[in-house]
Amino acid sequence: MWIPPETADPVLFLHPTRHSAGYFGAVRLRDGKFVFRREEDSFNGGTFWAFLKKLWRSSWQSGRTVVVIVDNAKYHHAGMHRPWRDAREARLQLDFLPPYSPELNPIERVWKLTRRNCLHNRYFPSLEVVTGSVEQLFNTWAKGSNVLRRLCAIT
């Protein structure tokens, strides 16, 4: 916005009802299936553990090792789910990225594509409409997507 130079910069306040939604997500590279879980409150060890359980339930039947690429958030290292992960260590591995390297995390590309496809240049009157739009796309991807498979493949 343009302001005359003799005027002090204005203070812009956010709307008091501004809210956000958070999601855990993972892409299976074999077929591009997307597994996601919405978080209502905050990201912590318990919510990450619940997502890992959902990911495990959707993947354990294949008999393949599941490698999850994660950043170094504290809840990824939480001791509360360590025994559960250790019991599945042969078939479930967390691969921790170096600190401060989001460009190496393939899921960041998925979040960028989601913003471009669902949120960019659109008006949403409520958070429920936002999550409805996002989850509609996520449910489509949950059946498998060549776009996600190619987007997340590290070659």
Image: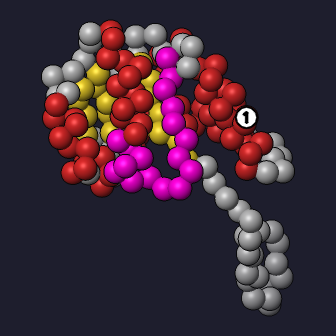
Which residue occupies the foreground of this view, 151 or 80? 80
| Left or right: 129 in relation to 93 | right
Residue occupying image coordinates x 32% and y 33%: 69
Q: To which quarter of the image does residue 27 belong?
A: top left
The range drawn in magenta is 33-49
Residue 106 place in picture, x, y as percent: 42, 31
Residue occupying image coordinates x 49% and y 17%: 33
Q: To which quarter of the image does residue 137 belong?
A: top right
Name which residue type carries label 1.
Answer: Ser
Can you identify the residue that label 1 sits on? 133
Quadrant assignment for the N terminus: bottom right
Q: To which quarter of the image does residue 48 belong?
A: top left
| Left or right: 18 in relation to 141 | right
Residue 30 place in picture, x, y as percent: 40, 10
User: Looking at the picture, does residue 28 appear above or below residue 26?
Assistant: above
Figure coloring: secondary structure
Residue 134 place in picture, x, y as percent: 67, 35
Quadrant assignment for the C terminus: top left
Residue occupying image coordinates x 47% and y 39%: 24
Instruction: Let me know if residue 47 is in the magenta part.
Output: yes
Residue occupying image coordinates x 41% and y 37%: 51
| Left or right: 41 in relation to 155 | right
| Left or right: 46 in relation to 114 | left
Which residue occupies the foreground of this view, 141 or 39? 39
Which residue occupies the foreground of this view, 49 or 72? 49
Q: How crowded is mark 1: few (under 14 residues within 10 Å), some or many (20 or more)?
A: some
User: Looking at the picture, does residue 89 appear above or below residue 127?
Assistant: above
**Is residue 44 visible in the rendered structure shown here?**
yes
Instruction: Let me know if residue 41 is in the magenta part.
Output: yes
